[in-house]
Image (cartoon, rainbow, N blue to C red):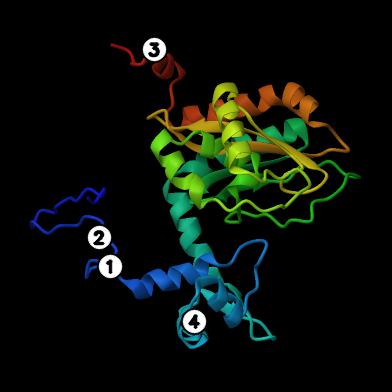
Amino acid sequence: MSTWRSSEGDDGLDFGVPRLSEPRYSQSLERGLEILGCFSPQRPVLGIADIADELGMSRSTTHRYVITLFALGYLKQNKSRKYRLALGVTALGMAALNSTGLRENAHPEIKALVRRTNFTSGLAVLDGTDITFVDRVRGHRRGYQKSALTINVGSRLPAAVTSLGKLLLASLPDPERRRILPEIKLRRHGPNSIMTKAALRGELIAIREGGLATNDQELESGFCSIAAPVRDGSTDVVAALNLVAPRQAIVLPELMSDLGPHLIATADVISARLGYRLETSENGHGDD
């Protein structure tokens, strides 16, 4: 039985989400989007063979789709005839992020948090098994180890190796979390990356009970982070806010105890800007 719910427009036409087997479903569009999804911060440049192997398509078919995406401005080609994402993809992503008002409401508060702590802060949303950065403000401390990762607005990272992603996974409704966990591919990124689904499930339970998520060298050696939830007027967790620090500046327990309250306070202010009311969450109703 299908789990999608259809809706009808004023003219009686069914605008429900089509099943994959229905004539309305475009396999060509699906393949084009899958090709764009192959690119990541870890693999920003790919050749035709790389994409074909990852998606299980023939090289001739892959080449046809890639050339189309290139002509439409969603991919660009380098001198070695390999491809990377072009600004057409960035424009779409930014249009989607800006339409929520999330970044507009959060950015001044994130800048203030970075000024108070001098550490980098980022805001992200869950996108499948990855996170996508809605905003990021770099800290001002000098003389410490620098990250080898280039992370900007629109960058994606695997959810399971980031404090942001683990917070967002832990905040999902139980049915949605059970659906998405089998899709997560656990790979070693830092020395402490979670490598088993059992360990990941256990950490998500701890996050739901404690309210904060942590990352101690799971994404990258030498860095730790903490993340707090950002909610909207419906009390749903719509994003996560973090603080990232080099371990030579501060260790994780101190990051949590010394700067955790600042992070939570900032996340609460952003949530209030999005319509979240703490008394509504605690009492189960608003003012009568």
- In depth, the one of 152 and 43 nearer the eye is 43
Mark 3: give few (<14), some (14-19) or many (20+) Cα within 10 Å: few
- Determine which of the numbered discs, if any, sits on residue 25 in the image: 1
Mark 2: give few (<14), some (14-19) or many (20+) Cα within 10 Å: some
- Determine which of the numbered discs, if any, sits on residue 192 in the image: none
Location of residue 139 in the rendering, given as x and y in whole percent from the top left corner? 76, 42
- Do we see residue 173 in this rendering? no
Marks 3 and 4, Cα distance to the nearest angstrom? 54 Å
Marks 4 and 1, Cα distance to the nearest angstrom? 19 Å
Marks 2 and 4, Cα distance to the nearest angstrom? 25 Å
Query: Label 2's element?
Result: loop
Q: Name which of mark 4 and mark 1 comes first in the sequence.
A: 1
Question: Looking at numbered disc 2 in the image, what kind of residue is underneath it?
Answer: Pro
Q: Which residue position is annotated with label 3? A: 283
Marks 2 and 1, Cα distance to the nearest angstrom? 6 Å
Mark 1: give few (<14), some (14-19) or many (20+) Cα within 10 Å: few
Q: Name which of mark 3 and mark 4 comes first in the sequence.
A: 4
Residue at position x 61%, y 40% from top? Answer: 164
Location of residue 31 in the rendering, given as x and y in whole percent from the top left corner? 42, 72
Location of residue 261 in the rendering, given as x and y in whole percent from the top left corner? 67, 22
Marks 3 and 1, Cα distance to the nearest angstrom? 44 Å
Q: Which residue position is annotated with label 4? A: 62
Question: Looking at numbered disc 3 in the image, what kind of residue is underneath it?
Answer: Asn
- Determine which of the numbered discs, if any, sits on residue 18 in the image: 2
Query: Label 3's element?
Result: helix
